[in-house]
Image (spheres, grey):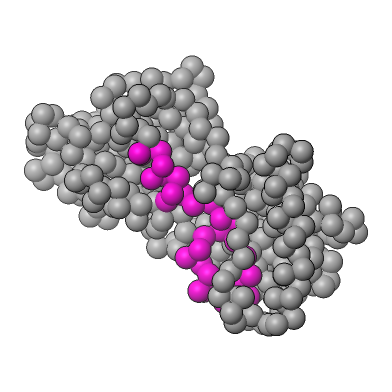
Amino acid sequence: MACSMLSRRRLLQGSGGFLLASGLLGATAARAQGALIGLVHTQAAGDAGPVDSMIAKLEQFAFENGLMPRAIHALDPATYETFFTTLAEAGASVVVSTFNEVAEPIRAVAPNFPGTRFIQLFGDPFEPTIPNMTTVSYDYYLGCYLSGIFAAHMSRSGKLGFIGGVAIPPIVADFNAFRAGALSVNPDITATAAFAGSFEDPAKGQEIATQMFSDGIDFIQTDAAATDFGIIAAASEREGRLVSCLDPAQFELAPRNLISIVGLDFGESLYNEVVRATAPGWEAGHVSTGLGTGVIDFIRNPLFIEQGSAELNAMAEAAMPQVDAARAAILAGSLQVEFNTNL
């Protein structure tokens, strides 16, 4: 996307104040090269989840390595290429971005800046590979399979729910794996999926979750980023409503209802990939991240263990041996979970 330097400055100054163009964009490449590391995120910060954790890890890496971190919330898809271009022109050694919607803008910009290494988290492989570009995908559905096993043990009604942000193929695969895990325990259990149409709509999440709980569903797995806030709020309205979410930062939001997470640590993933990208011998390409990597796993909420009902915690303890056995079987290759994208 063609854009003057002045218009790029205005865009960056209007991006929430994360990147001040004055001085930085006027620096010579020699001064700026390697001094900057950038993150362009398409969902808002303040989600107690993926974006907050990525920003925190970006800042940690920058502090440890004497770099300047710049996190930019890109609200408008029309600005994606401009942000990537401006960061690269400013001498960023690494530019990280997130989610499927940035694929084509990164594909367009990265080849023009061979000195900058680009990373797309939650992205599909590029064919052919771009020499200075890494894409990272997540086998989150495997963690959802484990959550389904757990949920089947925890549900008294035999009715489970799943609320995703948008019905894109990976999220649909997460639901199907969640349902498959539950059916492996109880072939008569039902699992219902709904999608909020957004990863940033807590009100819609609360509306859907409230209806699910009213229909007798007693355990909901979320896959909806900031929309989770509303789902958690709906669960918190009544004892016995259980929800499993995404990020450890959510644990304290409902310690008597949020019983577990299928953790996908975007921050840890960002940190790992930036370490690789700044190390000698880095190779571009695609990275598939799953169980056993420290990025994805099924985790019980330690606050629920402390504050949740004794009866529910006893049920959870009884469920964990089967969850642990399934995790071990997946890692050993003896249990294959289908990546099913059909609703």
Q: Is residue 134 left or right of residue 69?
A: right
Q: Position of residue 75 (x, y in %)?
A: 38, 48
Task: Identify the residue shown where x is 41% and y is 42%.
Answer: 272
Q: Is residue 101 above or below residue 131?
A: below
Q: Is residue 337 left or right of residue 141?
A: right
Quadrant of image for the C terminus: top right
Quadrant of image for the N terminus: top left
Question: Is any part of residue 100 visible from this angle?
Answer: no
Residue 252 falls within the magenta-colored stretch:
yes
The foreground one among 275 and 26 is: 275
Residue 182 falls within the magenta-colored stretch:
no
Q: Is residue 108 left or right of residue 139?
A: left
Task: Identify the residue shown where x is 50% and y is 24%.
Answer: 126
Q: Is residue 56 left or right of residue 47?
A: left
The foreground one among 102 and 152 is: 152
Q: Position of residue 332 (x, y in %)?
A: 70, 39
Question: Is any part of residue 318 visible from this angle?
Answer: yes
Q: How many marks?
A: 0
Task: Identify the residue shown where x is 46% and y is 54%.
Answer: 50
Q: Position of residue 46 (x, y in %)?
A: 40, 63
Which image quarter: residue 187? bottom right
Task: Identify the residue shown where x is 50% and y is 63%.
Answer: 248
Check the image and name the residue furthest to the top: 128
Range covered by the magenta-colored residues:
246-275
Check the image and name the residue furthest to the right: 188
Q: Position of residue 327 (x, y in %)?
A: 69, 49
